Image (cartoon, rainbow, N blue to C red):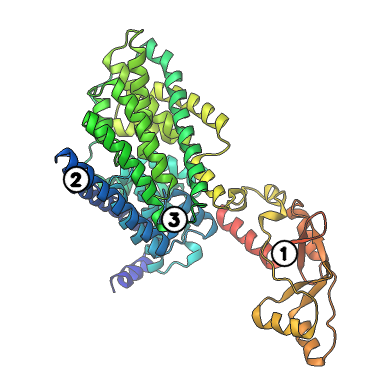
Amino acid sequence: MKSNIVARLAQKWPGQGRPIFLTCLYGLSAGGVAVAFQWSMNLFYSQTLLRFSGHARGAFLLESFVLLVGTSAAVGFLLNHYCREASGSGIPQLKLAFWKDFGYVPWRVVWVKFLAGVISIGGGSSLGREGPSVQLGGALSSNVAGWLGAAKQNRRRAALAGAAAGLAAAFNTPLAAITFTLEEIIEDLNSRFLGSVLLASVIGAFVVHGLVGKQPAFSLKEVEAPGWPVYVLTPVVAAAAALAGVIFQKVTLDLRQRRKGFERVPPWLRPVIGAVVTWAVGSAVFLNTGHLGVFGLGYVDLSAGLNQDLGWQLAGLLLVTKLVATCACYGFGGCGGVFSPMLFLGGMCGLFLAGLSGLAMDLHPADHVVLAVVGMSGCLGAVVGAPVTGILIVFEMTHQFSLVPALMLGALVSQAVGRRLTPSNFYEALLLQDGHDLQHVIPPRDLQSWLQLPVSAIANFHPVIAPGVAPEALATLLRDHPQQRFPVVMQDTLAGILTRREAELALAEKRTPKLDKAVVCQPQRTIGELQSLLIESASLLVVVVDAQERILGLVTLHDLLRAETALAKGNE
């Protein structure tokens, strides 16, 4: 009833003001769910692992083990039985939904991601909250748009606005939310969605200011402008932090690939492997140092380091152990993001190198802080491939303008290292590993680029092939498949194209069906060439074949028109 009232109100809103009204609704809903997610996760963490840390050593080991194993098993059950799209960070999945499904995200993603993220991160898994916040914001806004009457193919604006508001609320960083949404999800800083992203980010920031407060994520003492030793060390720290990010990416992707071969372990139990690794290294660090930084977000220890209350030797230990735990948690199928772990790894890398350099150089305490934030920005920027976001998010999280020059220098170095060692950022690599080539998902920006795309970008590589024209085979083919045209293979050779109408007539008249001439092309031919071939084809179908003339797939006129419609909607 309430959604119907809001829908009618939205329909009555003046034409030019309706998108603004709807964007405000998306920002409010996404900001609200991000704050609720953060509050629930922190409450769960404080009532479990944080409380356990005050118990005796033996009790802590048992309680923390049961907690991590139990929550990881529950997360695996939720993800594998209800919604696989809610696994991991959620940002690649939202990006894929934005481009491939026009912004439509099923409702199950919202509740599974919320519940799985809370018990995963709150239960101690070494993952972050920003990815879930982005996916939750985008998914909820997509569903809000649906409740207000938007068709499934018209929800890109809602999903994008929700993603921006979710990230702005997660970190209290509206500027970084704007640049990340444009850099990573749309990959276009001049997008027509810029206005909606700006407004939604502001709304998300207002929500977190009103419900949580306007304080930055990390409170630092005033940092003076750094001197020349810091600028000498900045490239070194940025390169090392980027290298840590590259190691995370390569190890995590390798674990994700290897876990698919663990046939003796049910898929829903595989996150438990990452939980056991995290428990082992996290408990060892806690029992010897009293620090819980390996578990969960680790922001308490990172804040201590930024306020010069953490030794550089301990920072080095936390760097290595947090890296191991995060790779294990993400690689074995946990539910959570990578922003927080990368900020932690980069910060610890900067603190460790600053402390080590301080043995030979005269560094002030504030210099250690500057190098720590350079590491934070460098590691994050190298992993997500968004240097502007890496700079802005650290700046907004600390509110220290004097850090900006060092952050900019560090971003240049970290991007050079990251792009040299990895062909794509972490999110793109995840999609590629799961079989989604972004070149086939994101439409080109202009007609000429579209015409130069290969036919493989739009072909159907799972065609239904007619194995001959015998009456029994034709009857089975028509009964089991609704398609209107079928390539016919006889004696391992493409014989022609059979239309459904011709097959029905041939069966009725008890004769051999007539076949249309098959027009073929190889997958590397361009879409521009494909258009001419479709015109030549009597059946408006082109068969995609390899060099030996074996059938690989099909392209119909419908496939071409659908792809061009997606191009138009993506660039309008």
Viewer-side residue, 47 vs 442: 47
Q: Nearer the viewer, mark 3 or mark 1?
A: 3
Relative to 166, say whether 293 is above or below.
above
One can see residue 127 in this view: no
Res. 459 image quadrant? bottom right
Residues marked 2 and 3 touching at CB (< 8 Å): no
For the point 49% across and 62% down, which residue is it?
Answer: 154
Q: Say which quadrant the N terminus sits in.
A: bottom left
Looking at the image, tell me whether mark 3 or mark 1 is earlier in sequence order. 3
Relative to 510, say whether 43 is above or below.
above
According to the image, label 1 marks what residue? 554
The amino acid on which the numbered mark 3 sits, given as a three-letter code, is Val
Distance (Cα) linking label 3 and label 1: 38 Å
Q: Nearer the viewer, mark 2 or mark 3?
A: 3
For the point 33% across and 72% down, which residue is it?
Answer: 4
Looking at the image, tell me whether mark 2 or mark 3 is earlier in sequence order. 2
**Residue 54 appears at what percent x and percent y?**
14, 39
Crowdedness of circle 2 by 10 Å Cα count: few (<14), some, many (20+)?
Answer: some
Q: Nearer the viewer, mark 1 or mark 2?
A: 2
According to the image, label 2 marks what residue? 46
Residues marked 3 and 1 touching at CB (< 8 Å): no
**Residue 512 appears at what percent x and percent y?**
85, 84
According to the image, label 3 marks what residue? 265
Distance (Cα) linking label 2 and label 3: 31 Å
Distance (Cα) linking label 1 and label 2: 56 Å
Asked which secondary structure carries label 3, the reply is: loop
The amino acid on which the numbered mark 1 sits, given as a three-letter code, is Leu
Residue 269 vs residue 313: left or right? right
Viewer-side residue, 379 vs 403: 379
